[in-house]
Amino acid sequence: MSASETPQAAGPAALRKESVLSAAHRPLTLGIVSVVLLIAFEATAVGTAMPLAADELDGISLYAYAFSAFFTTSIVGMVTSGQWCDRRGPLPPLATGIALFAAGLVFSGTAAAMWIFVLGRAVQGVGGGLVIVALYVTVSRAYPEHLRPTVMASFAASWVVPSIVGPLISGTVTEHLGWRWVFLGIPALVVVPLLVMLPPLRRRASGPPEGAAARQNAGAGKPVDGDARRIRLALAVALGAGLLQYAGQDRSWIAAVPAAAGIALLVPSLRVLLPRGTARAARGLPAVILLRGVAAGSYVVAESFVPLMLVTQRGLSVTMAGLTLAAGGALWALGSFAQSRPGMEPHRRRLVRLGMALVVVGIGYTPLVLVHSVPVWSLAVAMGVGCFGMGLTISSLSVLMLRLSAPEEAGRNSAALQLSDGLSNVLLLAVTGALFAALGGGSVTVGASGPHGGSKAATAGEPAAFAAVYAVSALVALAGVWVAGRLRPREAAAAPAAGGGSEGSGGSGAQPRQPVSEARPSDGAAAPAAVPLEPNG
């Protein structure tokens, strides 16, 4: 039974009673949420254990690559998963991705040298990219449209507990059993949710999506060739991102060579992998894809520098600096929960714009803490405001992306959304990292010099380096407020759908057709004939 068959024939009363935990959805919901929960725990736990792992393997010089290897290979996994889902459904890439993710953890956990550890992280990245896109397609295929915001909210909620207890558990395991058990223990935990999830997933979301067979017949074999081309382009994007990361860490003029090579690989590849019009924020799907990257990149940059700023500029211990971000996970989940409420559906695009405005407020306040008369606790409040805005924004953008995607395009567009998210992180971190180093941030030290483990005040030039990072981040987030005004497809902006009137068309009115010029990827693949008709606008 597909999602499109379930709710609409049953009428409004059934829609009100149905939930993600009703009998028809419960096993799949518990399974996919458990997978996200374990991925979230892995992200927080591994980050805590990583310094000791690099030190024991004598690989501090390769420390950054243990993170970047995961990101760069995840790009390939995302694009591959999108193609795979659109041809055969989400089950094969999801199962393969979980297996590769677990294999990468085992590979890193048993590594005898740092380069083997980094290689394991690369395998993990491929698996993670396969899984995240397949999960989005699963939501599209297995749940009716009115339940998708709730599923997205549950994904966000799955990060709350790991973000709070993950570092504590990981630190305890590392101290008493060793860092290797942080990596080796997680794969065993994947077995149960996998067994719970696969049977309902096989029944409800396996096989090619609607329209895939007709599309392949019309293409006479071309989709397979197109898939191979997109995977090659994903490899080019991963290599280009890696070159830009490398160039961002080198302040010499010779770094311009890998930077130029990275840009030369990225630009033509992204023109194919992202929907046409993404770079100029064309209305509808392109703007949704772009805003996902703008929101994620601006916030991740800001959050990444907060602990370092508090330790070096305000003398906090590393633990206390991390606690200033502890409430962020809960408020992010709260924002995601707020957007999932049925009463919010007619205002989804406004919620995104409000969310981006809150992100600007949170980021814009952060550098004020460089002034010692400003209390540090106020930064926790400001970052909480930004996290609430991110919860409103990120989950709503996922819902809008699925709504603007025909079934046979859900995998490709989910991959584009994740690609925009991940790539923006590395690009903005490369830019702000280079700016930070140029303004004297490279002289920052985190050595303990007081009873609480904080460091002494830094030189006068270092506050300017932090301020510059947050200025860039805030400007990018502010641009996101403008992009949020372009989420409505062009035809919907010109003439709202009959029966709805408001931006949500919360009744049975049909959604407007997505303009072909805006929805079609630039590699010439066939565009969906129309946006799928859903009960909520």
Image: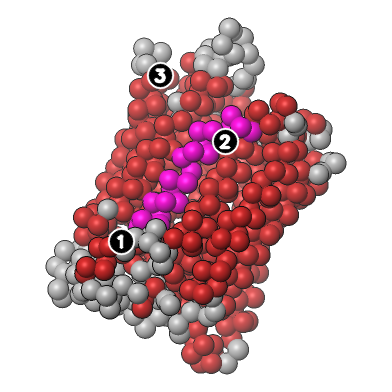
Relative placement, left or right, of 494 versus 19 is left
- The image quadrant of residue 474 is top left
SS at circle 3: loop
Instruction: Identify the residue shown where x is 70% and y is 30%.
Output: 174
> Taking 174 as reference, is 452 above or below it?
above
Which colouring convention does the figure follow?
secondary structure
2 or 3: tag closer to the N-terminus? 2
Tell me the chief SS of the magenta region: helix
**Numbered disc in front, either 2 or 3:** 2
Relative placement, left or right, of 20 versus 307 is left
To which residue does mark 1 refer? 487
As shown in the figure, which amino acid type bears the numbered disc 1?
A: Leu
Relative placement, left or right, of 300 versus 97 is left
> Taking 514 as reference, is 129 above or below it?
above
Q: Indicate yes or no whether the magenta region holds residue 326.
A: no
To which residue does mark 2 refer? 166
Percent of width and height locating residue 129 = 59, 58
Q: Which residues are magenta?
A: 149-170
Real-space Cα distance between discs 2 and 3?
A: 24 Å
To which residue does mark 3 refer? 376
Real-space Cα distance between discs 3 and 1?
A: 36 Å
Percent of width and height locating residue 327 = 41, 31
